[in-house]
Image (cartoon, rainbow, N blue to C red):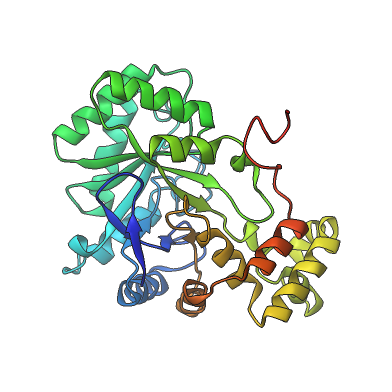
């Protein structure tokens, strides 16, 4: 396994991050345990979850949210695991029907952290991430709440998810004014078919020293050989996306075949090629899927292949403002 620093921090994490959104919703506990055991054995030390994961992510349901954390907590309770992993979770999403059961008020951050610690059966969260920007709550209030959690030893590092570039900038300026480290990472939608963050989020991450953790690195399965699978009668739920991107997918899968590599491995290797990327989040539903993903760590794409991928899946044209102005 390869390791790298999480942004400008001194924390080292594996180049793959194990995503656990499927735990409890798609993957039952026994299979989830197998996946985590396999990940640890493979050297993956970076585990990502969220308080809302494990069900339909709706507070109107009597059960569902929090299940992923609970499964991880029961796995950790077996012993000998907690200090071997970097555990990341998130706060923001609705965790109840009350008006203060969501977003980033100091009130909710405190309660959400305590609830996550209880479900995870641990006394600290290594990376506590804001799941979304909350522009209604002042950053002074948010950072004060995070500072207290850090002082109490309940949180080690702070991260963001789904922030715009200017959100990262304002958050870091507010943290600096408080002499607080602020964000060490940003978790964003990023893959070959979704490259909008190249405009401003990636430049902001580079400037402020944030590690980038891409979610949906395979575009929800689109980049994992969707065309071939559809031909074989699988993944019919992707039929609309396939038709929308058919010319690109035909060219992409033909390139992967020419390279002698699986489409999913090429998509992951493309992300790993970017020096700003810390660790793509892989969300295997089975132990076998996890094992197959490891091939991407060994794959070095030649310059010609990288150039061709840019032709097939063009980004926004570079970084702002040069991407659209003289």
> Where 239 falls versus 261 (above or below)?
above
> Could you tell whether 75 is left or right of 148 in the image?
right
> Could you tell whether 294 is left or right of 235 in the image?
left
State the residue in front, 100 or 168: 168
Which image quadrant: the C terminus? top right
State the residue in front, 41 or 120: 41
Would residue 73 be visible to someone looking at this image? Answer: yes
Q: Residue at (43%, 28%) from the top-left corner? A: 103
Q: Residue furthest bottom?
A: 260
Q: Residue furthest front?
A: 326
State the residue in front, 38 or 115: 38
Residue 6, percent across and down? 34, 50
> Could you tell whether 247 is left or right of 211 in the image?
right
Q: Residue at (62%, 38%) from the top-left corner? A: 319
Residue 81, percent across and down? 21, 66
Q: Residue at (21%, 54%) from the top-left corner? A: 121
Residue 72, percent across and down? 32, 60
Which image quadrant: the N terminus? bottom left
- Numbered marks: total: 0
Would residue 71 be visible to someone looking at this image? Answer: no
The answer to which image quadrant residue 112 occupies is top left
> Where 90 falls versus 104 (above or below)?
below
> Where 291 falls versus 268 (above or below)?
below
Residue 271, percent across and down? 55, 59
The answer to which image quadrant residue 216 occupies is bottom right
Q: Residue furthest left?
A: 152
């Amino acid at each position: 396994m390869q390791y790298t620093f999480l942004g400008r921090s001194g924390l080292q994490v594996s180049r793959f991050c194990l995503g656990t959104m499927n735990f409890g919703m798609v993957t039952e506990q026994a299979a989830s345990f197998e996946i985590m055991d396999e990940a640890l054995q493979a050297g993956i030390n970076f585990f990502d979850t969220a308080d809302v994961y494990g069900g339909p992510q709706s507070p109107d349901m009597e059960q569902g949210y929090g299940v992923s954390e609970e499964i991880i907590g029961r796995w950790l309770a077996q012993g000998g695991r907690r200090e071997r992993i970097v555990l990341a979770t998130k706060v923001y999403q609705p965790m109840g029907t009350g008006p203060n059961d969501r977003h980033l008020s100091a009130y909710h951050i405190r309660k959400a952290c305590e609830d996550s610690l209880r479900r995870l059966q641990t006394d600290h969260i290594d990376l506590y991430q804001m799941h979304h920007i909350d522009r209604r709550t002042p950053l002074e209030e948010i950072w004060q709440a995070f500072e207290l959690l850090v002082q109490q030893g309940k949180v080690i590092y702070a991260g963001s998810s789904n922030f715009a570039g200017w959100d990262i900038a304002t958050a870091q300026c507010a943290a600096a004014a408080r002499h607080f480290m602020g964000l060490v990472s940003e978790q964003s939608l990023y893959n070959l078919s979704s490259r909008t963050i190249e405009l401003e989020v990636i430049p902001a991450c580079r400037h402020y020293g944030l590690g980038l953790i891409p979610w949906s690195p395979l575009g929800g399965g689109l980049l994992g050989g969707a065309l071939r699978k559809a031909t074989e009668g699988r993944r019919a739920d992707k039929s609309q996306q396939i038709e929308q991107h058919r010319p690109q997918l035909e060219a992409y899968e033909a390139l992967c075949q020419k390279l002698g590599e699986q489409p999913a491995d090429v998509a992951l290797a493309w992300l790993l090629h970017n020096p700003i990327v810390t660790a793509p989040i892989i969300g295997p539903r089975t132990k076998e899927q996890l094992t197959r993903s490891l091939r991407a760590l060994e794959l070095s794409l030649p310059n010609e292949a990288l150039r061709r991928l840019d032709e097939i899946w063009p980004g926004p044209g570079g970084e702002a403002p040069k991407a659209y102005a003289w």
